[in-house]
């Protein structure tokens, strides 16, 4: 009963039936259980059979039978004559043979050649290049596969097609290591290529691991795409100084009326032309590369500080001086009064202006009439209102009075003559 329960709990049972004199190849995953059937053995005791094992654990043939005990935890014969390996390992690789005698005396032989395997993790490309230069050797990266058995192989692919090392434009440096305790393998493959001048500008590389046993699928890395730069036989030009990248703004002041248009042009004198990106208030704008930035129907959201960044593959990146964009507030004709204080205040100002003008006119008329009245009044003042003079001047006073009387007589006669 206990033996039957153990057999029923196996995670994996692999069996192979062969001809009496034939030998079959069998593969099993490391750490999994394996059952080998003994062909021709009676299903129930008594049984006449024996197993012979020649593996990495034995120096010579190891013999097991139903009558004998188990071989430690390595293997044991089951009641039906099959051989059980509870957890097969690398040392269990080898030859397994069974010879059984049936109840009628017929002898049957079974033979197995057992190999084990372990699937590694997905390979990956470490230390990949950021770019390639045409005409010179370049390291693409190193493909690594860990924890596999048997060792297997690594291979490179270019644009989905196998890349064959030729020692010239393509070379591969391989390294294989085996763990001293587990016996599993680690593979490394370093790829060097020399891109041809005028070749594909953006080649795609990938790597794959192929197991050492047949009928096992290959494992592939994620592809990497690199850019190929043209090699330059001359010394690299000096980086473009910051002052050579200029930002031109129209209007020049950067001040524009609400709803107006502003044009920003980034000038970088390099060949081939660099890529131009724009920055506002220190934050890159999510716009495609362009040497011209057009701000139409400018609003408050467009105010701020703008600059441009010119990026050239051989000159690096340079940023221009910043310019400020601001909005000018304008007032339309006919709305001045209303914009200041409303229509009531405008009417009051007009009335005060008219009254002020009338007051000035009245003042001028009053001054003119007062001066005329004063002039006439000086002529008609009576002598009796004049101040008395000293006695020594009486003779002169009498003479003046006589002259005054003579001048008044003709005026009185004229006034009498003109009366009714």
Image (cartoon, rainbow, N blue to C red):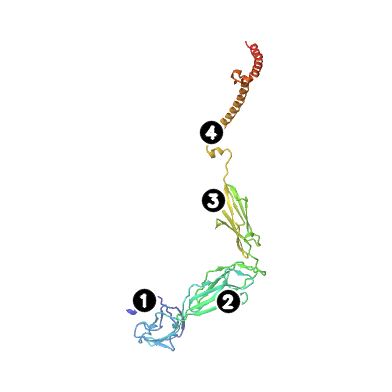
Place residue 404 in its image quadrant.
Answer: top right
Mark 3–mark 1 Cα distance, whole angstroms, equals 75 Å
* The C terminus - image quarter: top right
Q: To which residue does mark 4 refer?
A: 348
| Residue 4 screen position, x and y as percent | 34, 78
Q: Residue at x 56, y 30 (%)?
A: 355
Relative placement, left or right, of 381 versus 66 is right
| Residue contact between numbered discs 4 and 2, judged by CB atoms under 8 Å | no
Q: Secondary structure at mark 3?
A: helix
Furthest-top residue in view? 420
Mark 4–mark 1 Cα distance, whole angstroms, equals 110 Å
Mark 3–mark 2 Cα distance, whole angstroms, equals 57 Å
First in sequence, mark 4 or 2: give its number.
2
Mark 4–mark 3 Cα distance, whole angstroms, equals 39 Å
Front disc: 4 or 3? 4
Numbered badge on residue 8: 1
Q: Secondary structure at mark 2?
A: strand
Camera-nearest residue between 177 and 254: 254
Front disc: 3 or 1? 3
Q: Is residue 282 above or below residue 105?
A: above
Camera-nearest residue between 127 and 319: 319
| Residue 384 screen position, x and y as percent | 59, 18
Numbered badge on residue 172: 2
| Residue 339 screen position, x and y as percent | 54, 40
Front disc: 3 or 2? 3
Mark 4–mark 2 Cα distance, whole angstroms, equals 96 Å
The reply to whether residue 187 is in sight is yes
Mark 4 residue crowding within 10 angstroms, few (<14) / some (14–19) / many (20+): few
Mark 2 residue crowding within 10 angstroms, few (<14) / some (14–19) / many (20+): some
First in sequence, mark 4 or 1: give its number.
1
């Amino acid at each position: 009963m206990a033996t039957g329960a153990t057999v029923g709990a196996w995670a994996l049972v692999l069996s192979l039936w062969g001809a009496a004199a034939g030998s079959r190849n069998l593969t099993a995953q490391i750490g999994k259980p394996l059952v080998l059937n003994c062909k021709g053995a009676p299903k129930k005791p008594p049984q006449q059979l024996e197993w012979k094992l020649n593996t990495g654990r034995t120096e010579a043939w190891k013999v097991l039978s139903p009558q004998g005990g188990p071989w430690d935890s390595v293997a044991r014969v089951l009641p039906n004559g099959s051989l059980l390996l509870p957890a097969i390992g690398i040392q269990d690789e080898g030859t397994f043979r069974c010879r059984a005698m049936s109840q009628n005396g017929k002898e049957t032989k079974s033979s197995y050649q057992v190999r084990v395997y372990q699937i590694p993790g997905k390979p990956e490309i470490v230390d990949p290049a950021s770019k390639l230069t045409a005409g010179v050797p370049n390291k693409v990266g190193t493909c690594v596969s860990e924890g596999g058995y048997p060792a297997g192989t690594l291979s490179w692919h270019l644009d989905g097609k196998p890349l064959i090392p030729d020692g010239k434009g393509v070379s591969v440096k391989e390294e294989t290591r085996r763990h001293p305790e587990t016996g599993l393998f680690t593979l490394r493959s370093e790829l060097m290529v020399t891109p041809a001048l005028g070749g594909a500008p953006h080649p795609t590389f990938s790597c794959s691991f192929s197991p050492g046993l047949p009928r096992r699928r290959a494992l592939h890395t994620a592809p990497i795409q690199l850019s190929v730069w043209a090699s330059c036989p001359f010394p690299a030009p000096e980086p473009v100084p910051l002052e050579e990248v200029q930002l031109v703004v129209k209007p020049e002041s950067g001040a524009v009326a609400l709803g107006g248009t502003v044009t920003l042009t980034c000038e970088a004198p390099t060949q081939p032309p660099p890529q131009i990106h724009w920055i506002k208030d220190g934050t890159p704008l999510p716009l495609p590369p362009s040497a011209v930035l057009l701000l139409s129907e400018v609003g408050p959201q467009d105010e701020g500080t703008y600059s441009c960044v010119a990026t050239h593959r051989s000159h690096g990146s340079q940023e221009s001086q910043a310019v400020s964009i601001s909005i000018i507030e304008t007032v339309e004709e006919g709305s001045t009064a209303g914009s200041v204080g409303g229509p009531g205040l405008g009417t009051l100002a007009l009335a005060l202006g008219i009254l002020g003008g009338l007051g000035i006119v009245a003042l001028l008329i009053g001054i003119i009439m007062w001066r005329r009245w004063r002039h006439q009044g000086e002529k008609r003042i009576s002598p009796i209102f004049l101040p008395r003079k000293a006695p020594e001047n009486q003779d002169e006073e009498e003479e003046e009075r006589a002259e005054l009387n003579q001048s008044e007589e003709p005026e009185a006669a004229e006034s009498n003559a003109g009366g009714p």
